[in-house]
Image (cartoon, rainbow, N blue to C red):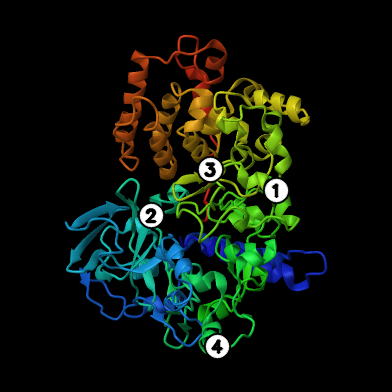
Amino acid sequence: MNRWLLLAALLSAIGSLLFADRGGRRRVTVVGASITAALVLAAWHWRDPRTPPAAADRGVRRSAIDPTPKVGTVPRIASDAGFAHSETCRECHQEQYQSWHGTYHRTMTQVATPTTVIPDISDRLVLTAQRRTSTIERRGDEFWVTMADPDWELQQRSRGVDLETISDPPAIERRIVMTTGSHHLQAYWIGGRDGGLRQVPWEYHLAEQRWLPVEDVFLRPPESGRMFSHWNSKCIQCHSVDGSPGWQAESQQFKTTVAELGIACESCHGAGADHVRGQRAGTDRPMTTILNPRRQTADVSARVCGQCHATFQPRDRAQFNLRGFQHRVGEPLEQSRELATFDHPARPAMEKQGMVVYWGDRACRVGGAEYLGLVETPCYQANQLSCLSCHSMHESDANQQLAEGMRGNQACLQCHSDFAARLEEHTHHSAESSGSLCYNCHMPHTSYALLTAMRSHRIDSPNIASSVQHGRPNACNLCHLDRTLAWSANHLMQWYNQPELPLSKDQQQIAASLLWLLQGDAMQRAITAWHLGWSPTHRAAGDDWQSRFLSLLFDDPYPAVRFLAYQSLRRLPGFADFDFDYLAPRDVRLAAGRQILEQLSDHPPPTSAPRAAAVLLDRTGKPLQSTIDRLRKQRDDRPVDIPE
């Protein structure tokens, strides 16, 4: 959610220093580098995009329960900004309204009610993590939380206090007034002293039906500590229509307004009040204020989605804090947003701090930022491909929102029709196999968000160079998990005349998946762990050897990696009911891993000799432990922070 201040500091500092002369060579002065370094360190230390310290300082006091009544609440619905609201659109566009109403876009932000709060809170919940206990309970039609005071904790952090040293912060009791999300996770918001909304430190995972600490939902360095989010200064950018933070410098308060909560009609079609007035008056003037993304060129259409599905910060933070984005739908995003593109000069500094938005081959790592992958795609650059080439808001299932007929190869064949008659000749796989599904080869799951792997939207062809030179797992080895990089390289060279690459001994002899899993960085481990449970890989590589290696990830320092490992383990034969808590103390997690290894020692998996060596098993199915231990000692422990 709001893990963005580092990005903002880097973009602001470097942008102001480097972009003074856009026509000439970009240079960083010594002073500029010092300022940037200071901002990076400050941003890394204080990860919450919040109001100036004065707002947090006022009225803070230490007590058992803080009864302070003057706090932020649900943003006020503005009626004077040219927006009409989806209920007004419904009067004429009933069919479109109904199709939108069934999407997760509509339910992205909602007032907290018994209807919108998804988990059952009939009983009082007591949740503990990060040495903090929160209680959540229902009172009639309201939901209340007692938790550590986030404003007080942020004040302490701003003064240089290590929150890990505080075991008894003052508590507050606040009503939960708003929710975010209804598809994968749901987050909850309470009022803060600055008039804005602070996040409850727990989210609800819908598939697992489990409450998770917000710090453990993201792929972020485990030493990062407490995480605080502020809706009015960040989430409002995408999770509302015409969100205006309304920061008041004099009162040090947010007076936030929105045209509508959630992602609604006017998020994509633009402000509709003038259009409504014209239609009601019976005029036939052109609908100049309404934009239909389907009738636009590919680049303009993609911007409609890109205004949210990208990593960015406001180009003018002060103006945004006051009035929000003054941006018309379809206009170039660069006019209002500083996009974290691959070529942005801040990228190297971001990566040194662990915030890695891209693989080195220009593919975006961040799920939900698909626009940044799309713009790197040749089809988009030729103005032939947009988001709506495959997706639809009004003619799709709410899950993934792929348009009718676009879940299979028709999505690609609508343009690349010449491949239809020679599919097997092109793919070298059976037409019915997952290896002949265009998505699997050209859009592999190499992005991450929401505790899952997601498809890359930088559409490209499988190649080993990206894996060898940049660490990005390639599509061949993400399906053929039991094969080496050399095996894939040889096939790509024979089939598509790709150049031969020098490979190390390990890359020639050990399955690429295990190299990523055992010695890769946190992102590589997360992506590979997810694929070990992906059903197409079981058909291609078997399902009787992965459990041993997934059990090793039970001790991974990143909670998100442990979560993914357990998810994949449960998809393997014999482990559907295996009990494991990825947030349990380390000794408990290690015991669970040993339990799996003991089970395997009694019943080693049957293996063929060629595959056994690649997946680090001997001919009897016993592990090649010395090699496994060597690779684990080489694990890349550089920090990885995926800015969802």
Whichever of callouts 1 and 4 sits on the residue coming sooner in the sequence is 4
Quadrant of the rendering where the N terminus is positioned: bottom left
Q: Nearer the viewer, residue 570 or 559?
A: 570
Question: What's the distance in space between the residues labelled 4 and 2, CA to CA?
Answer: 44 Å
Asked if the residue at tag 3 contacts the one at tag 2, i.e. Cβ–Cβ closer than 8 Å, the answer is no
Label ID, residue 282: 4
Name the amino acid type tagged 4.
Gly
Number of residues whose C-alpha sits closer than 10 Å to that of mark 4, classed few (under 14), some (14–19) or many (20 or more): few
Cα separation between marks 1 and 4: 41 Å
Q: Residue at x 71, y 44 (%)?
A: 416
Give the image location of residue 544, x and y in percent.
43, 21
Label 1 sits on what residue type?
Cys
Going from the N terminus, do you reach mark 1 or mark 3 first?
A: 1
Q: Is residue 263 visible?
A: no
Which marked residue is nearer to the observer: mark 1 or mark 2? 1
Going from N to C along the chain, the mark reached first, 4 or 2, is 2
Sequence order check, earlier mark of 3 and 4: 4
Above-or-below relation of 399 to 151: above
**SS at mark 3?**
helix
User: Badge 2 is on which residue?
Assistant: 185
Q: Around disc 2, counting alpha carbons within 10 Å, would you say few (fewer than 14), some (14 to 19), or many (20 or more)? A: many
Between the C-alphas of marks 1 and 3, the distance is 33 Å
Marks 1 & 2, CB-CB < 8 Å contact: no
- Reading the image, the residue beneath label 1 is 415
What kind of element bears circle 2? strand
Residue type at mark 3 is Met
Q: Earlier in the sequence, mark 1 or mark 2?
A: 2
Neighbor class of circle 1 (other Cα within 10 Å; few <14, some 14-19, many 20+) is few
Point out the frontmost of discs 1 and 3: 1
Q: Are marks 1 and 4 in contact (CB under 8 Å)?
A: no
